[in-house]
């Protein structure tokens, strides 16, 4: 019988590619979204939509009814609460075999807990591992696709001196790994580090991205204090959060060591060069 997977946040940056990959791999997909029109446009008409808010328990219960798996692709600020609510409902219903997949991060380690996003991610991981409900946790490296976030109004900027290389990873490869995890019991109750094929400095990755998508644009580096000032002048909470995250990464936080995910889930093999061949000039 076809397995049905609920994707919470299925119209998001990571949730949409996961929902599409699950469909392509033959799963039946249910999406919990806030905006039906946006979701239909992004995901097509094969996805079953539940429209509502994940903070509402009745909506969550409705969305969870009859599914075999759940993927949490929600903003990091809500992750621990959603992980607790989902596992509480499943445990109360005695549905401990419904596997919950969750996107943590490559630097989700106790020593980095001082940074609020990592604290939230570790709380979400703990909610899953202590719930008694089946889970698969992913700690992906930086997504190649997130390089777009570094470009604003035609300017490409890396905030902070980013000295640590990261194994940049295509979201499509990550979505494939999430889908694969539902296809093997070996992935149950494990935490996987998901890296791309090659470690790169952010500045170098961004320059390569610009060379294809924004030809002629030079990737600049700016101190985070300057970024904070710009965010305040622009009254942009999104930019403030982004610069704060870059200030965290400027400290070269410890990353989780690779743990053989490719043996169970296959390798994430798309290089930045290959990924860029699929991109158009902006
Ligand atoms: N490793 C990396 O490089 C990287 C990069 C980016 C993200 N991530 C991780 O990926 C995960 C997902 O992040 P994302 O960037 O995909 O987030 P996102 O694009 O903001 O998507 C989140 C989705 O959740 C939905 N949502 C928000 N609040 C909701 C609510 N109250 N009820 C129902 N739906 C709600 C949003 O709906 P709307 O569509 O209505 O807004 C959106 O579709 C996070 O764990 C994040 O840390 C990792």
Image (tube, rainbow, N blue to C red):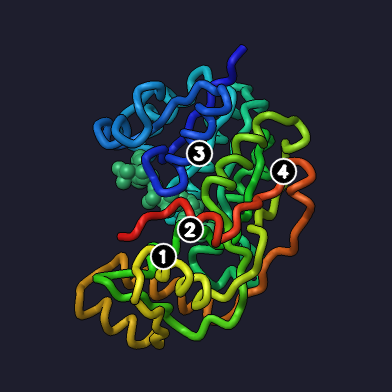
The answer, for residue 122, to whether it is visible in the render is: no
Above or below, 124 relative to 205: above
Q: Which residue is mark 4?
A: 266
Q: Position of residue 156 (x, y in %)?
A: 36, 75
At 37% from the left and 63% from the top, the residue drawn is 213
Query: Closer to the observer: label 4 or label 2?
Result: 2
Label located before the other in sequence (1 or 4): 1
Determine whether label 3 and label 2 are within 8 Å by CB: no
Circle 3 SS class: helix
Determine whether label 2 and label 1 are within 8 Å by CB: yes
Determine whether label 3 and label 4 are within 8 Å by CB: no
At 60% from the left and 72% from the top, the residue drawn is 200
Above or below, 197 relative to 92: below
Could you classify mark 1 by the number of other residues whose Cα lies within 10 Å: few (under 14), some (14-19), or many (20 or more)? Answer: some
Q: Position of residue 163 (x, y in %)?
A: 58, 82
Q: Which residue is mark 3?
A: 18
At 27% from the left and 76% from the top, the residue drawn is 231
Q: Position of residue 257 (x, y in %)?
A: 74, 64
Depth check: give the residue in front, 53 or 270: 270
Q: Quadrant of residue 96?
A: top right
Q: CA distance from mark 4 to mark 2?
A: 22 Å
Q: CA distance from mark 1 to mark 4?
A: 28 Å
Q: Which residue is mark 1?
A: 212
Q: CA distance from mark 3 to mark 1?
A: 25 Å
At 29% from the left and 70% from the top, the residue drawn is 152
Q: Which residue is mark 2?
A: 276
Determine whether label 4 and label 2 are within 8 Å by CB: no
Query: Closer to the observer: label 1 or label 4?
Result: 1
Query: Closer to the observer: label 3 or label 2?
Result: 2
Determine whether label 1 and label 4 are within 8 Å by CB: no
Query: Closer to the observer: label 3 or label 4?
Result: 4
Quarter of the image that includes the C terminus: bottom left
């Amino acid at each position: 019988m076809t397995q049905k997977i609920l994707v919470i946040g299925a119209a998001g940056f990571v949730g949409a590619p996961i929902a599409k990959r699950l469909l392509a791999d033959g799963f039946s997909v249910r999406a919990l979204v806030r905006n039906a029109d946006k979701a239909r446009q992004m995901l097509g008409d094969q996805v079953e939509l539940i429209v509502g808010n994940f903070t509402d328990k009745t909506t969550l219960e409705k969305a969870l009814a009859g599914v075999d798996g759940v993927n949490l692709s929600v903003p990091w600020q809500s992750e621990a609460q959603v992980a607790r609510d989902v596992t509480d409902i499943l445990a109360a219903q005695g549905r401990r075999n419904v596997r919950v997949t969750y996107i943590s991060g490559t630097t989700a380690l106790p020593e980095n807990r001082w940074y609020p996003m990592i604290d939230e991610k570790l709380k979400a991981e703990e909610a899953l591992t202590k719930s008694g409900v089946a889970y698969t946790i992913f700690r992906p490296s930086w997504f190649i696709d997130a390089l777009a976030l570094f470009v604003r109004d035609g300017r490409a900027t890396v905030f902070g001196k980013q000295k640590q290389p990261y194994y940049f990873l295509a979201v499509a490869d990550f979505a494939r790994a999430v889908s694969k995890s539902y296809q093997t019991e070996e992935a149950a109750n494990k935490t996987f580090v998901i890296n791309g094929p090659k470690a790169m400095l952010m500045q170098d990755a961004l320059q390569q991205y610009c060379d294809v998508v924004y030809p002629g644009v030079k990737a600049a580096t700016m101190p985070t204090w300057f970024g904070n000032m710009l965010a305040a002048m622009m009254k942009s909470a999104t930019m403030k959060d982004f610069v704060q995250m870059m200030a965290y990464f400027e400290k070269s936080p410890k990353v989780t060591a690779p743990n053989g995910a490719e043996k169970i889930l296959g390798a994430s093999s798309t290089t930045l060069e290959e990924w860029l061949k699929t991109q158009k000039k902006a």
